[in-house]
Image (cartoon, rainbow, N blue to C red):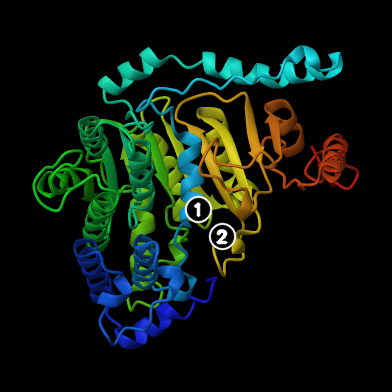
Amino acid sequence: MQNGVSGWYARLDRCLDNREQQIDIWLSTWEKSLRSFQPIAALLPEDWPTLPANLLTDPGHVLDHLLARHDAESDGRSPRGAHPTPPRLADAVICSEMRDNLVNPKKPVQQSNFLMSNLPPGFRQHVEQLNLPKATQDSDVNDDDEREAVEQNKRTLSGIPLPVADTAAGGGLFHARLIRRHADAHEDADPELQKEDTRRFFSNIQLLDVDPLVVKSTKLRLLLESIRHELVSFGPETPGKISRKEMEALLDEGVKQGDALQGDWPWASAPELVLTNPPWLRIKDRFRGMEDGSQLRKELGERLRSLTDNGVPRFSTMRGNVNLYRLFIERSLQILKDGGRLRIIAPDSLLREQSSHPLRELLVKHHGWTHAWAIEEANLLFPGMTQGVVVLGITANGEAPVLNLHGPITRADLRREGEGLSSRVPVFQLNEERWTSWARETWAVPRLPRDRVERAHTLKVLDRLAKLPRLSDEEHPLTPCRLP
């Protein structure tokens, strides 16, 4: 962990080793802080270690760490390997799927007094070309259609697609960041309009987690985040704010305990958007250190393989040493409505490892795999992590003519506006014909360098190598002759 806070959680464990009590004290202190307008650090128990300054600004991030350590210990892993989703990455992922803000009318573009005729002809032509895409983009947005979608509860005025779900909620980070974005959009809006849109948002959230402690903590965390951003009041309803009692009722409906992999989706309406960072955990590593861990792992694997929906296996891509994040990808696409979007954070081994071939083929042949954000230096985002990270963008039961491969992405490239990424990030459009030639229908995604010259050279090498025979081909000179 960066910024000198790596030892705080370990010191806290020495003061109080009960994780449930740690979480309960933290959440209750956070609520006291909101009520009394005092900093959390001044209200924590005296025997707790001094809270570093870097942890003062976002109480939810501390909760994410505590819950991640709780999950690791529940699975038999070391809490040192617990890596919650960084808020900066969550913001960028959310931004890439947001729709236009309809809360305030668009401000007219301020015209410059500088005359275009004063520019040389070559410069005028270049400026006109730069202005063309913006004008085209603005004309593509139909406000009437978008407002009709708001009335049908398909989106909020603040631009959030509805319903919005998380199949492995953790501490509810994605929805907590959506709350912040929703509040920012309504900053100067009419209070009654804000209240109505807030009801619309929280009436269409769907968060599911298997752990009762996580579910309880997530409900309180989202309540406190809403109070913090002045969407909910502590007591009765006030201008611009819904009451705490109403909010708690909405959270009871929107945050539930259940197993997304093995159970049914407990909501009648299919989500339009799923944002999730599921456990990166192999079945063989589940229940590690437990006395009957071997038997529990065997039973879990058998149950997952035997699950069917209308006679069809629920998980058709279970191959080899199964990692749970692969199952969450397949299950999330089943839960989504047709044309709904999945944004999921996963290890970048998914892009190349042989055991993920069936899953990649499913994404290409039966869904619309549109985006892949490649974050190779993941240790700058997830302190202590050595494995790369990929953010997938997939349209359920859709089509994708190309895969937009963004990266390599650094921490500095993540944005809270636009498409979520800096314009400096290189993008390569991988079409199916070239993809098939390179990977021979294993749908492996190559790792491309960021430098433009190196990237061009790498693409030429890949195209040249794709034409050569491989050891697995019958015509390769080293392949043994097959007798009839």
Image mark for residue 470: none
Q: Nearer the viewer, residue 188 or 153?
A: 188
At numbered mark 2, what does the secondary structure look like: helix, strand or loop? loop
Mark 2: few/some/many CA within 10 Å (<14, 14-19, 20+): many
Q: Hey, which residue is sitting farthest front in the picture?
A: 113
Q: Nearer the viewer, residue 366 or 129?
A: 129
Q: Nearer the viewer, residue 131 or 165?
A: 131
Q: Amino acid at mark 2?
A: Leu
Image coords of residue 389 (percent x, y): 58, 54
Residue underneath mark 2: 381
Image mark for residue 88: 1
Q: At x 35% / y 51%, what residue is drawn?
A: 168
Q: Earlier in the sequence, mark 1 or mark 2?
A: 1
Mark 1: few/some/many CA within 10 Å (<14, 14-19, 20+): some
Query: The C terminus is located in which quarter?
Result: top right
Q: Relative to 353, is 47 on the left or the right?
A: left
Image coords of residue 303 (percent x, y): 33, 53
Q: Nearer the viewer, mark 1 or mark 2?
A: 1
Relative to 133, does residue 59 appear above or below in the rendering? below
At numbered mark 1, what does the secondary structure look like: helix, strand or loop? helix
Image coords of residue 274 (percent x, y): 39, 39
Q: Amino acid at mark 1?
A: Arg
